[in-house]
Every structure is written in C-alpha cells, then in structure tokens.
Image: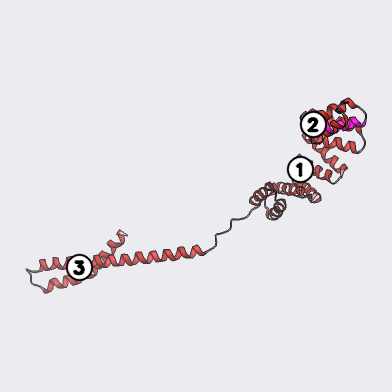
Amino acid sequence: MILLKKVLILKHTILYLPLLLFYQNQNSYHMRPLKSIGFFLLLIGHSILVAQDSTSTTTSDTSTIKQSHNKYFAQLPAPEPEKNAETLMKEAIVHFDGGRYQKSIEILDEAIDINEFPQLMPILHFYRAVSNVKVKQYEAAIKDYTKAIEFNPKKSKYIYHRGLAHFQLSQYELAKKDFQTTLVMDGGNADIYVKLAFLKQQENDLKGAIEGYTKAIEFNPKFAAPYYYRGLIYLQVLLHDKACFDLQKAADLGHPLALRQYDKYCAGK
C-alpha cells in the first residue's frame, strides 16, 4: 500500500513538472526561486491528495471484489469427500458395531464394486459375510467366505467361519471339512473341537464325541460348553458320577443350562 502511494505521488509530480518549468520562464529572474518553491510545494500537496484518493478507491474496489468472491464461494456446496473402498469399509464397520447390519451390507456392496486393490478384496468379502450371518443370510455368507478364501486361501479364519455357516444350515459334512482343514492349519482350537465333537454326536459316534469334548477341555479348561455336552453323553451311557461332575463344572463356569440338568439328575442323589 505504501509503495502504491509513492508511485502515484511520483506519477502526478512528473505530470505537473512541465508546468513548473513554464512558470519559471514567465517570471522575473529574482522572483523565480521563491515562486518556484511555492508552486512545487503546491504541486506535491496536490499529488499526495490525488494519490490518497486513488489508493482509497483501489482499496475499496479490492474490498468489494473480495466480498463478492467470498459471497460467491459461500453459496457453493461443500465438495463431497472422495469415496474409496477402505473408507467405505470403515463406515460399514461403524454400522456393524452399532447393530445396523443391513446398512453395513449395503455399504460393503458399494465398496466391493469400486475396490481397486486386490489385497483388500478378501477383507471386504469377509466383513460382508459376517454381516450376512448376523441377519441369518447364511447362504450369502458362505458365498462371501468362499470368495475371501479364493483371494487368500491361507487365512484359516475364513475357512473356520465358513464352516460355522455350513453348521447353521445343518450342512454337517461341509462344516466338518472346513473345521478339519482349520485344525490342520492352526493346530488346535477348543471351539473347533466342540463343533467336531457335536458332529460326531449327530452321527451317533459317542466315543468320538467324548474324545472331541475332552480335547476341547485340554485346550481351554475354562470353556463351559464341552463339560456340559460331555456330561449329557455320560448321562446317556449311564456314567452317572462323571455326568454329575461335568454338569457341576459347567454350571460353575456359567453355562446357562447346566444347573437345571444338574438339579434334575444329580442333586440329592
């Protein structure tokens, strides 16, 4: 701003300089210095006033343009954040955690459609499968688990969860195959042993079922379910003392049905 004023003063001074020279030529030799000085001061003062007026006008114009610019852009809608598969996946997880499983599925549908990164694809399919399980869409879940396995066949978690979905649909042979594959890959899991033992129980292989439940207890002695189911088998084969021990243990570990069975078959006997 200061530089602009200086430029304007210099400009107007130069414009009036010929008048000063003409005025000097028209006056007497002795009066020229005083008159020239007075006229020059008048000239400088006029230039300053013109410069201030020009600067004020320029500042006003600049302010008006700036206000118009701000007003125009304030009316424009805020740009939407760019969507990508990872962002959508995080959004879907928020909905899943909030119990909005169908919304989670819809967002994951879009994420899978626009995803450009192969390494993200099995994760997206896995999350959509888990969401489908929550709304009891087990067949859709199995398809997504299978897709996830195709992208990453070394991820035992995908195979295990597909086995659980088969189990829910009573597709026991397919469930058993997935559980056994998971055992080979991971080397042991109490819940898998319980599921395999239950499948043996469905096949009336009670000895194999007892062995499976016992394996599960070895892996996790604080897991109530294998005690409960093994206790029921012991009741079935008339091993009363073992049955009562298992049912009592399951009740102590918090199994919701164990205490009722214990009171029915063991209490006071």
Amino acid found under the numbered disc labelled 3: Leu
**Residue 239, image x and y in percent?**
91, 27
Q: Secondary structure at mark 2?
A: helix
Quadrant location of residue 196?
A: top right
Labelled pair 1, 2 in contact (Cβ < 8 Å): no
Image quadrant holding the N terminus, namely bottom left
Q: Earlier in the sequence, mark 3 or mark 1?
A: 3
Which secondary structure type mostly characterizes the magenta part of the structure?
helix
Residue type at numbered disc 1: Tyr
Segment tinted magenta in the rendering: 222-236
From the viewer's perspective, is 212 left or right of 100?
right
Q: Which mark is residue 251?
A: 2
Percent from the top left, x then y, of residue 52? 28, 65
Is mark 3 in CB contact (under 8 Å) with mark 1? no
Residue at the (14%, 67%) spot, across then down: 38
Q: Label for residue 43?
A: 3
In the depicted view, which residue is nearer to us: 124 or 238? 238
Question: Dot 1 surroundings within 10 Å: few (below 14), some, or many (20 or more)?
Answer: many
Q: Nearer the viewer, residue 119 or 124?
A: 124
In the visual, does 86 lie left or right of 210?
left
